[in-house]
Amino acid sequence: MISPKDSVILWSYDASPFTQKALGMFAIKRLPFRWVETPMMPPKDDLLALTGGYRGTPVLQIGAEVFIDSQLIARELERIQPSPTLFPLGGGLELALVRWSDAFFRSALKIVLSIGLAEWPESFREDRQYLFPDIDFASVGVDAAHSRSQFRAHAALLAAQLDDGRDFLGGVAPGLADVQAYPFIWMARGAFADVAAELLSGFPSLAAWEQRMQALWTVERQQIAAASALEEARAARPVTPESIDQADAQGLQAGRLVDILPDDTRRGVVRGRLHVVAADRVVIRPSADLSYGQLVHFPRLGYRVTPVA
Ligand SMILES: N[C@@H](CCC(=O)N[C@@H](CS)C(=O)NCC(=O)O)C(=O)O
């Protein structure tokens, strides 16, 4: 029998800092994996067939189970290989940092937009404006100084944590807290190197941590075709048992038809019937035409579940 470890497949593209989070998790766990490279923008038919309609990156596949968002990828990798842990601080705190991490990302994204938007191909610009409806690409340059101040303020928090001489944010070992932070320093160095050098100056403990994180970020992966990953999903059977939290805040019940979508960017809507309802996740069986009985797991944090009338 193939073990869950051997069957892990990451669907992603490397330019995304959120993909980098997933890569960092695999690196900390020294866990080899298989990888399907997805396009950066639609069409993404293979990924949509897998997820039932979610176009984002990263997504993890284990047989006929699909895990949306870096939050659930962290939990799943921890489940299949507990050591070395991603959660040296206990788990909840490191997972809660996802919202802080998103704010750090947005400060970096706005700097990218204020500097490089004019160079982007029009189709990519239009796609990204669609993805981020709350950011007005046309006026983001006007607010550039503020965005830079926000990015530097986030970096200063990291330095404050590291100034006591610890190697990683949680102490002696790297963990999910580091993974929530490093990709945006990486993004800044790659996308706006000169400005990043200024905004990250004066933080020696942060610079030393950055070197350690860079050294850590190596992964062992084998690229496979989307078609063979989908074939594997079709051939497998999902294993997660049905379960419903009787204290669910929305009173959701098994079998209910719902739409699920991220509450920050337009990464797609997935319609399906509820299979698991818990405080921290929901699992559905997508009802899209192309579905083949897979189970798709979504975090509750940052995702809106709407019953379909
Ligand atoms: N909260 C999600 C955020 C993922 C996310 O926003 N990914 C971006 C890439 S930077 C995305 O999917 N963009 C749309 C696309 O790639 O099609 C996570 O942590 O996985």
Image (tube, helix red, strand yellow):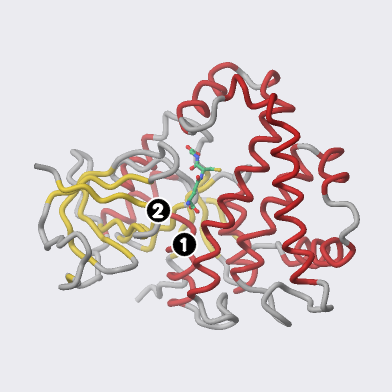
Instruction: For label 1, count other residues whose C-alpha is less than 10 Å away and answer few (under 14), some (14-19) or many (20+).
Output: many
Query: In terms of depth relative to the viewer, which is nearer, 51 or 170?
Result: 170
- Left-right relation of 138 to 241: right
- Residue 30 image-quadrant placement: bottom right
Q: Amino acid at mark 2?
A: Gly
Q: Nearer the viewer, residue 153 or 64?
A: 153
Q: What residue is drawn where x is 73% and y is 63%?
A: 158
| Amino acid residing under circle 1 | Gln
- Helix, strand or loop at label 1? It is helix
Q: Quadrant of the C terminus?
A: top left
- Expressed as whole percent of the image width and height from the top left, the position of residue 188 reads 74, 44
Residue behind label 2 places its C-beta within 8 angstroms of ligand 1: yes
Q: What is the C-alpha distance between the residues marked 2 and 1?
A: 10 Å
Q: Residue 214 at x, y = what percent?
A: 77, 61
Residue at mark 1: 71
Residue sitting at x 43%, y 70%: 76
Considering the numbered disc 2 on the image, is that residue within a helix, a strand or a loop? Answer: loop
Q: Which residue is drawn at the image coordinates 22% and 56% (left, top)?
A: 284
Q: Is residue 114 left or right of residue 23?
A: right
Residue receiving disc 2: 302
Q: Are marks 2 and 1 in contact (CB under 8 Å)?
A: yes
Which residue is nearer to you in this view: 223 or 174? 174
The residue shown at (70%, 62%) is 218
- Position of 133 with respect to 110 (left or right) is left
**Rendered-image quadrant of the N terminus:** bottom left
Q: Is mark 1 within 8 Å of ligand 1?
A: yes
Q: Earlier in the sequence, mark 2 or mark 1?
A: 1
Q: Is residue 87 left or right of residue 232?
A: right
